[in-house]
Image: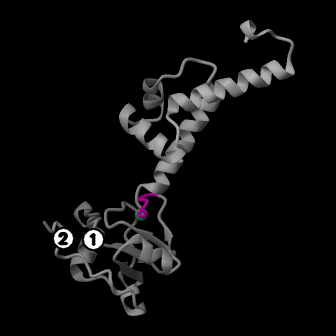
């Protein structure tokens, strides 16, 4: 079963010419209408800013003559363009890492309180399931394991630095 979209460009050919394509009328229309249907098909870079975006990006429409089309983020990175912070065209890796950093900093500031997956999901805006999966993929631990580890480190540190008994901690 071949589910590849027929309009996908042939990414086999990475020669220089293909790395600097001008937008077709169809691609240009997708860019100015922020058309999400084209997000899987190409990304565009703007020569004047050095930044590349998904077609659906809500950033200000670029000047057409400055736009170059790439078939994917990898090609744009190879051509020294930087991913847009707004539409994050490099896929979900970057936002996931940022998200996990946000979750970690929440845990670090709150681990002495009760933290459940539900709290984290509410505070960090994601479903508990998705949050747990993403956290584990990026850090190798579940959020709950991470909280426990923080508590153990904290307790050890307190035991070493103070005269409190274990029951006080
Ligand atoms: Zn963008």
How has the structure been colored for display?
Answer: one colour
Q: Residue at x 46, y 46 (%)?
A: 137
Left or right: 43, with 111 as reference point: left
Quadrant location, ligand no. 1: bottom left
Would you name the residue on which mark 1 appears?
41
Any magenta on residue 123?
Answer: no
Indicate the quadrant containing the N terminus: top left, top right, bottom left or bottom right. Answer: bottom left
> Within the image, what quadrant is residue 162 found in?
top right
**163 left or right of 118 in image:** right
Q: Quadrant of the C terminus?
A: top right
Q: In the image, which is nearer the foreground, mark 1 or mark 2?
A: 2
Q: Which residue is mark 2?
A: 5
Q: Is residue 133 visible?
A: yes
Occupied quadrant, residue 32: bottom left
Q: Residue at x 55, y 40 (%)?
A: 102
Q: Which residues are magenta?
A: 86-90
Tell me if residue 160 comes above or below residue 127 in the rendering: above
């Amino acid at each position: 079963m071949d589910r590849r979209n027929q309009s996908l460009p042939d990414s086999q050919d990475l020669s220089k010419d293909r790395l600097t394509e001008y937008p077709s009328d169809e691609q240009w229309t997708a860019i100015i209408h922020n058309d999400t249907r084209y997000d899987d098909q190409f990304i565009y870079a703007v020569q004047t800013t050095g930044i590349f975006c998904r077609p659906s990006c809500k950033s200000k429409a670029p000047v057409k003559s400055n736009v170059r089309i790439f078939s994917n983020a990898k090609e744009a990175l190879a051509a020294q363009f930087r991913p847009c912070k707004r539409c994050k065209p490099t896929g979900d890796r970057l936002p996931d890492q940022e998200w996990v950093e946000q979750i970690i900093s929440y845990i670090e500031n709150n681990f002495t309180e009760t933290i459940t997956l539900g709290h984290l999901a509410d505070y960090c805006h994601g479903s508990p399931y998705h949050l747990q999966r993403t956290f584990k993929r990026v850090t190798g631990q579940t959020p709950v394991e991470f909280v426990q580890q923080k508590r153990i480190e904290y307790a050890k540190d307190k035991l070493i630095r103070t005269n409190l008994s274990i029951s006080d901690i």
